[in-house]
Image (tube, rainbow, N blue to C red):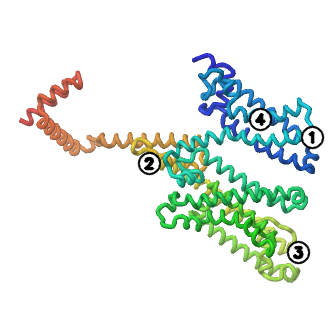
Amino acid sequence: MTPHHTSPIASIYKWLFDPEFRHGFHHQVERTLAFLIVASVIAVLIENTPEIYNSYKQCLHWFDVVTVGIFTVEYVMRLTTAHLNPDFAGKSFPRLRYALSFYALIDLIAIAPFYFARFVDVDVEMLRVLRIMRLARMFKLSRQIIPAWHEFQELNTGRSLRAKVFAMLEPTGHSGRLHTYIDNFIVFWVALSITCVILESVESFRSLFAVEFHVVDMMAFTIFTIEYIARVYSAPENPKYKHMRVSRWAHICSVSAIIDLLAILPFVLERLLSQHVDLRFLRVFRLIRMLKLTRYTSALQTLYKVVQREWQVIFASVFVMMLLVVLTASLGFLLEHEAQPDKFENIPQSIYWAIITLASVGYGDISPITPLGRLLTVIVALIGIGIFAIPAGLLASAFTDQLRIDREAFKQRLMLAYEDGMLDRAEKELIVAEAERLHLSHEEVKRLTDEARAEFEAKELQDHTHANGLVLDAKAHPTLAAAQFKLLVDQLSLITQATGEDTLRKNLAHINTDHQIELDILNIVAKRSL
């Protein structure tokens, strides 16, 4: 082992920056830096709003100091360990080459405005320019995006544009990390647009950020429209629609595509019908973009499988609850109608009281005042604790069971893929896509893969043992043992006649030095053949 592998500098590179070292913190460092980049850009944008900046000036200042400090430490450590980076290792002046590289210049630009403003006297206009220059920190994300793009290009060499677009949007064996980044980008804009819709309903926020809300809405509309068009364009690559003549139309009629269309429709309607329709309804209607998040999680799909599999049990529990609600409402109406005719006017009105009592909510707007009515309330409240817990318990247990079933199915798929002894490209693509659909981590995929390989090898060994070994108790079945022995002797005779006695003697001598037993058996078989 060379000395530089055990030096502190080598340890820093290995644990913090080396993507090949599986036990290091490379991925955690990249995620933390990405979060700080986004947060610092948002802080820079907030500084342009005096009403907020003046109130939190000190907090924003110290956040900027801490962020720049972290980025500075990162820059110095990357520069120090540049000679260990595979892109610069073995070259002359590796640190200088790194300092002049694209990523290093981006890192330097991200922190330079802060130090320039501290050590050089600048006027107000220059200070404003330096603040805007801090937005260049967004380019630090290129450290993750550019390698992901190169990986995507390698995975899709020779494939059509439509296939590449589909791989960007859906998990396949050709997607790579770029698909994950695109998913995160869309999820970010969904969350941002929803947050803006909610805050826009607050008058104080709307008056301060009216322009910003409009810009965010317009950008979100542009991004979601591009996504919708790209998904329609690449629909023929989807295995669900690949064999259909009207694959794009089938995609347009799907639930996910309808949700995507509804996410961009309010923006268009606001522009077309602003003179004739109350825009408040359309603005609230933009919250339907939240449903776009269902594409990026398998939770709803798992819940649908649970309901489909356990619908009889769930229906039975719901039926019991409804029966109890009607009976309780009827008794409440019978006992309280005379005492409170305005609150227990009829059974339908009493159902409201029965439901909130069984659910143990008890708003207090309707409550019995007669002794029997209060006794009924106590009994119903105690029963409701157990009755309403039944569906929740059923769904929770069935949900956990479904997750286990999905993982077992994934492992069975792996075992089927190992049947021919190796994984071809199509099988690897299918496994990668299934792992992304189930949102399995790299560690979970590796564990399930090891388990599947071990089970397949054990099964193969067991099948081989059963195929080549005779499972027979000779003492319990002497007749069968004799018949089996005769069959083996007949087979030896046929082998001797087909091969020749002399040929067998020569080859037995080559196979085994201690071959006297085989020769004796051969002599007996040869005499029997004569």
Of helix, strand and loop, which one carries label 4? helix
Q: CA distance from mark 4 to mark 1?
A: 20 Å
Tell which circle, 2 or 3, labels the residue nearer the N-terminal end: 3
Expressed as whole percent of the image width and height from the top left, the position of residue 226 reads: 65, 58
Question: What residue is shown with label 1?
Answer: 124
Q: Which residue is mark 3?
A: 369
User: Closer to the camera, 346 or 380?
Assistant: 346
205, 137: nearer the viewer: 137
**Cα distance between the residues tagged 2 and 3:** 67 Å
Q: Identify the residue shown where x is 39% and y is 42%.
A: 460
Q: Earlier in the sequence, mark 2 or mark 4?
A: 4
Question: Residue at coordinates 21% horizontally, 45% vertically from top-left?
Answer: 479
**Circle 2 residue:** 416
Secondary structure under tag 3 reads loop
Q: CA distance from mark 1 to mark 2?
A: 68 Å
Q: At label 1, which amino acid type do we have?
A: Val
* Residue type beneath disc 3: Ile
Estimate the x, y position of residue 129 in percent, counting from the top left: 85, 41
